[in-house]
Amino acid sequence: MGYKVAVVGATGNVGREILNVLAERTFPADEVFALASRRSVGVEVNYGDQTLKCQDLETFDFSKADFCLMSAGGSVSKEWSPRIAAKGCIVIDNSSAWRYDMDVPLIVPEVNADAARGYTKKNIIANPNCSTAQMVVVLKPLHDAATIKRVVVSTYQSVSGAGKDGMDELWAQTKGKYVPGQEVEPKKFPKQIAFNCIPHIDVFMEDGYTKEEWKMLAETKKILDPKIKVTATCVRVPVFVGHSEAVNIEFEKPITVEEARSILREAPGVVVVDKREPGGYVTPVDAAGEFATYVSRIREDATVENGLALWIVSDNLLKGAALNAVQIAETLINRKMLKAAA
């Protein structure tokens, strides 16, 4: 049986990647609809060897779709996801709009696939934040083995996480508009992003953390284990695609570097590249366009009892968004979680 899939936000970075992932993974779709706002109606996007013309989100009949992969931002999702879900179409949303709703499962299939059964409460499933998704894929098998107590993570997040405007701003500043010693007026970011790092993603909260940092804490607890303590520092860096994370983990039980490396080599969605030599690790450039989440620099953290430190890299547009959304739909199908009416 084939399914009908609507992709909302099909002209954006993530929407286009969703179409690519659906085609590359040969998702069992009889028909795929590309949807966008009225101003993008008629814009052509690629789906495998097909070219789709974008249709208007506001006039589309969602009763003829089984899945809606939503990548149009939080405000659009807040308005439209319940209306789409009421038509019997399962919404898998990439924004933060539904992640913290107790009636909406927050899913990373390698970590908590069974929790996806809870989608029937609202017919909506949330995709986690890009920085959270890649981290919990790695944490899950280690948590199962030695029980994680605390995580300290510093992220190095690419500008694609801020959308096309973020990528355009880095490109414009890099290709010649920046002269050393000369001020550059930022537009998308609060400070110049070219040749710089900005320790500020999303809005600041009262406790001094940013919303992005809070998301990593809240989402890790919801997806993996509410008992895990998490503290994060999220930094925007001048990289086009690919998020990196330096992670320090404290465990309840002893776990050696060799044990961790062996566990991660067998973990779904994870690839270990950990040679202790120049170039024996993965960088964002290496991970761009790849489905895997990569782990390198696995070593003991001697500052705590039962501690490890490691380096995690993944394509944020894929595992952090498009790929994970498609994997959620695949999970519902493969585990026979779909309601009979679907």
Image (cartoon, rainbow, N blue to C red):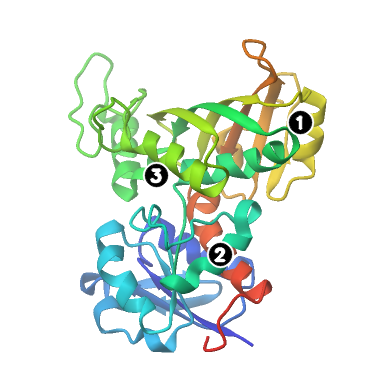
| Front position in the image: 300 or 281 | 300
| Front position in the image: 70 or 30 | 70
Residue flagged by tag 3: what amino acid is it?
Answer: Gly
Of badges 2 and 1, nearer the viewer stands 2
Expressed as whole percent of the image width and height from the top left, the position of residue 334 reads 68, 73
Q: Which mark is residue 161?
A: 3
Which quadrant of the structure image shows residue 102? bottom left
Residue 296 visible to an observer of this rendering: yes
Do the residues under discs 2 and 3 have CB atoms within 8 angstroms? Answer: no
Q: Is residue 162 above or below residue 61?
A: above
Of badges 2 and 3, nearer the viewer stands 2
In the current view of this chain or complex, which residue is farthest to the front?
227
**For the point 34% across and 33% down, which residue is it?**
175
**For the point 26% across and 32% down, which residue is it?**
205
Expressed as whole percent of the image width and height from the top left, the position of residue 56 reads 27, 79
Label 2 sits on residue: 116
Residue 314 visible to an observer of this rendering: no
In-image side of 38 versus 108 (left or right): left
Q: Is residue 339 above or below residue 258?
A: below
Of badges 3 and 1, nearer the viewer stands 1
Do the residues under discs 3 and 1 have CB atoms within 8 angstroms? Answer: no
Which quadrant of the structure image shows residue 337? bottom right
Q: Which mark is residue 260?
A: 1
N-terminal of the two: label 3 or label 1? Answer: 3
**For the point 17% across and 29% down, which residue is it?**
185
Residue flagged by tag 1: what amino acid is it?
Answer: Ala
Cα separation between marks 3 and 1: 29 Å
Residue flagged by tag 2: what amino acid is it?
Answer: Ala
| Front position in the image: 305 or 141 | 305
N-terminal of the two: label 2 or label 3? Answer: 2
